[in-house]
């Protein structure tokens, strides 16, 4: 049996194991695959009933920090009409061993099939309080932005300390500081260094951003952003980062948008990746749609997408489909 028979394909939150014909009285365990902080295994055992197991690789780290997982697991027959069986949602389940999650499948399956695991959240217990903390909402963006600015800059913005320029959003205004904006953005610096209307009027019009999104944008610039507001305004921040040449913010948005691709947003993310030249996001969306077969789950939305999508994107999708056909 080839090594590929044990390989699990992954994105940051999705794992798929493709299995050929499985004879009776057979046990098979996948190679380890990394999701979050843990290496995981999938295992199948076929007797009269098919049993599917999901568990983290046993290690000192797993014993001390067992994952508490929320996920959706599906069994997809790759033959005919791609029949799909879905296990009821698993929510905040602690998984330490191979016995902690076992799915008995009574429906007989023949031919090739796919085990599809979509991790919605992974948590660990905080060392001191025991409170559950998501590993995906630990405020990485907040830490990255705070590393580039002093904490006092946040107070300058929030308390309007000696502001010397006004930012006019679509539905409100915010006071800011020329020096801070110029230090963080070469576009702002150019505005203030030349005889432009922004220099004369001491105002900048950003009419394509709401006041909430604009406040979030300034919070990032001043090192005072919160992870929750970042997640809410990612797309608006991406537009602003591209417009005002904040490469670190653009990359933060790029990385974040790859982390929670799902059937509801994958087409929008693909369009965004093309518009703002985000190659890793585009590749993740393509893999999700084609390699992981999610294009079958959103046929109507995909057909509508083809009516207005850029020809280059359509061509890339079909090239990805052709490549996938050769490999399965």
Image (cartoon, rainbow, N blue to C red):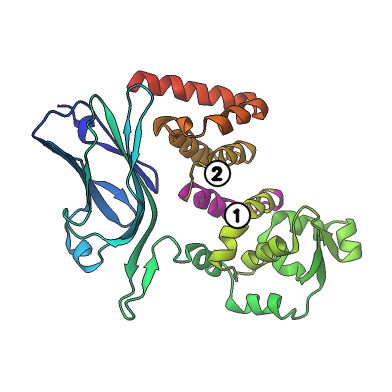
The answer to which of marks 1 and 2 sits earlier in the sequence is 1
Residue 8 placement: quadrant: top left
Check disc 1 and report the residue beneath it.
Answer: 234
As rendered, which of 118 and 61 lies closer to the eye?
A: 118
- The image position of residue 253, as x and y in percent, is 56, 52
Instruction: Quadrant for the N terminus, please.
Output: top left
Compared to residue 56, the image places residue 275 above or below, namely above
Label 1, label 2: how far apart the Cα atoms are = 13 Å
The segment highlighted magenta reads 243-259
- State the residue at coordinates (63%, 23%): 311
Foreground: disc 1 or disc 2: 2
Magenta region's main secondary structure? helix
Instruction: Quadrant for the C terminus, please.
Output: top left
Task: Give the farthest residue toward the front.
Answer: 106
Q: Tag 2: Cα neighbours inside 10 Å, few (<14), some, or many (≥20)? A: few
Left or right of residue 22: residue 279: right
Circles 1 and 2, Cβ within 8 Å, touching? The answer is no
As rendered, which of 139 and 302 lies closer to the eye?
A: 302
- State the residue at coordinates (56%, 37%): 267
- The image position of residue 35, as x and y in percent, is 33, 51
Residue 244 lies in magenta, yes or no? yes
Left or right of residue 156: residue 280: left
Compared to residue 2, the image places residue 178 above or below, namely below
Q: Which mark is residue 120?
A: none
SS label for mark 2? loop
Residue 138 lies in magenta, yes or no? no
Task: Give the farthest residue toward the left.
Answer: 25
Check disc 2 and report the residue beneath it.
Answer: 265
Residue 62 placement: quadrant: bottom left
Compared to residue 3, the image places residue 315 above or below, namely above
């Amino acid at each position: 049996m080839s090594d590929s028979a044990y390989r699990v394909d992954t994105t940051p939150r999705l794992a798929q194991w493709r299995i050929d014909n499985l004879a009776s009285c057979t046990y098979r365990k996948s190679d380890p695959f990394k999701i979050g902080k843990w290496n995981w295994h999938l295992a199948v055992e076929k007797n009269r009933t098919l049993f599917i197991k999901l568990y983290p690789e046993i290690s000192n780290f797993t014993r001390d920090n067992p994952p508490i997982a929320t996920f959706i697991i599906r069994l997809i027959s790759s033959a005919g009409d791609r029949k799909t069986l879905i296990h009821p949602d698993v929510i905040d389940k602690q998984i330490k061993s191979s016995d902690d999650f076992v799915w008995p499948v009574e429906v007989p399956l023949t031919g090739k099939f796919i085990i599809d695991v979509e991790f919605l959240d992974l948590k660990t217990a905080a060392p001191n309080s025991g409170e559950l903390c998501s590993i995906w909402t630990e405020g990485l963006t907040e830490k990255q932005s705070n590393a580039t600015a002093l904490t006092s800059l946040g107070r300058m913005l929030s308390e309007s300390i000696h502001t010397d320029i006004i930012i006019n959003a679509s539905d409100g205004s915010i006071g800011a500081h020329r020096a801070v904006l110029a230090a963080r953005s070469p576009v702002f610096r150019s505005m203030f260094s030349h005889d432009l209307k922004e220099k004369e009027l001491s105002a900048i019009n950003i009419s394509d951003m709401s006041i909430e999104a604009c406040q979030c944008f300034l919070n990032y610039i001043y090192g005072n952003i919160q992870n929750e507001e970042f997640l809410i305004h990612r797309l608006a921040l991406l537009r602003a980062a591209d417009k005002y040449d904040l490469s670190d913010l653009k990359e933060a948005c790029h990385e974040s948008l790859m982390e929670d691709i799902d059937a509801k947003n994958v087409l929008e993310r693909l369009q965004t990746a093309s518009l703002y030249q985000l190659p890793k996001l585009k590749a993740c969306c393509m893999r999700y749609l084609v390699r992981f077969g999610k294009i079958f789950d959103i046929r109507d939305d995909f057909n509508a997408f083809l009516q207005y999508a850029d020809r280059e994107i359509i061509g890339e999708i079909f090239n990805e489909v052709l490549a996938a056909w050769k490999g399965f």
